[in-house]
């Protein structure tokens, strides 16, 4: 039989403080983490309030760092970032603020760069199949359709 460990509210606060310091977290992640502990609703609210008051939990900071990270590291487009932030129950205001973290020129140069890289990896000789594969890739990355078609015309003309 597995022995269950019990923690005081103060111990849980310290654990969640460390959890938040390690990486910016959203409310949904904190609530998920709180489910690991057997707590009444009032205690959960008290812990979340403590994290908010001491700036361990900040949705705006989370959404900005999330958008910057996913764009700079994984090269996600704005649509994918918005979808993922909505999945995490981030407010529209914070989503708009987060998208301002992405530089417009850098955004355009990134989509061109990843489209050219992907195009060089595609072994398809048929023009339309190549175009479909490249379009699907950029849609999965979360880029806007008008931007994708603009990029496709430029990238595929070079081949």
Image (tube, grey):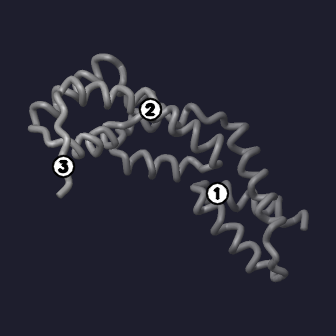
Where is residue 124? Give x, y as percent. 80, 79
Rendered position, 70 above or below 136: above
Q: Name the secondary structure under disc 3.
A: loop
What residue is disc 1 on? 146
Any mark on residue 3, and which? 3
Q: CA distance from mark 2 to mark 3?
A: 31 Å
Alpha carbons under labels 1 and 2: distance apart: 33 Å
Please report contact status of discs 1 and 2: CB closer than 8 Å, yes or no. no
How busy is the neighbourhood of tag 2: few (under 14 within 10 Å), some, or many (20 plus)? some
Which callout, 2 or 3, points at the residue further toward the start of the chain? 3
Q: Report the mark closest to the observer, 3 or 1.
A: 3
Residue identified by numbered label 2: 24
Q: Residue at x 28, y 45 (%)?
A: 32
Q: Quadrant of residue 104?
A: top right
Residue 74, percent from left and from top:
63, 48
Image: 10 above or below 108 = above
The residue under the point 47% across, 33% down is 23
**Residue lying at 24% horizontally and 27% vertically, measured from the top left:** 11
Q: Quadrant of the N terminus?
A: bottom left
Outermost residue on the right side: it is 158
Query: Distance from label 3 to label 1 (Cα)?
Result: 57 Å
Earlier along the polypeptide chain: callout 3 or callout 1?
3
Q: Are marks 3 and 1 in contact (CB under 8 Å)?
A: no
Check the picture and name the quadrant holding the C terminus: bottom right
Mark 1: secondary structure = helix
| Badge 1 or badge 2: first in the primary sequence | 2
State the residue at coordinates (73%, 57%).
150
Task: Report the residue that reaches farthest toward the front.
Answer: 1
Name the front one of labels 1 and 2. 2
């Amino acid at each position: 039989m597995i022995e269950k460990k019990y923690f005081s509210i103060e111990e849980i606060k310290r654990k969640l403080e460390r959890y938040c310091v390690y990486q910016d977290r959203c409310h949904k992640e904190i609530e998920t983490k709180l489910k690991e502990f057997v707590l009444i609703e009032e205690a959960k609210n008290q812990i979340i309030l403590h994290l908010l008051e001491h700036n361990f939990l900040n949705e705006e900071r989370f959404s900005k760092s999330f958008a910057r990270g996913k764009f700079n590291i994984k090269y996600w487009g704005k649509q994918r970032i918005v979808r993922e932030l909505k999945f995490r129950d981030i407010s529209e205001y914070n989503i708009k603020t987060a998208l301002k973290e992405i530089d417009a020129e850098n955004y355009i140069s990134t989509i061109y760069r990843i489209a050219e890289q992907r195009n060089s990896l595609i072994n398809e000789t048929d023009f339309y199949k190549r175009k479909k594969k490249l379009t699907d890739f950029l849609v999965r990355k979360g880029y806007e359709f008008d931007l994708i078609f603009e990029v496709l015309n430029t990238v595929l003309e070079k081949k």
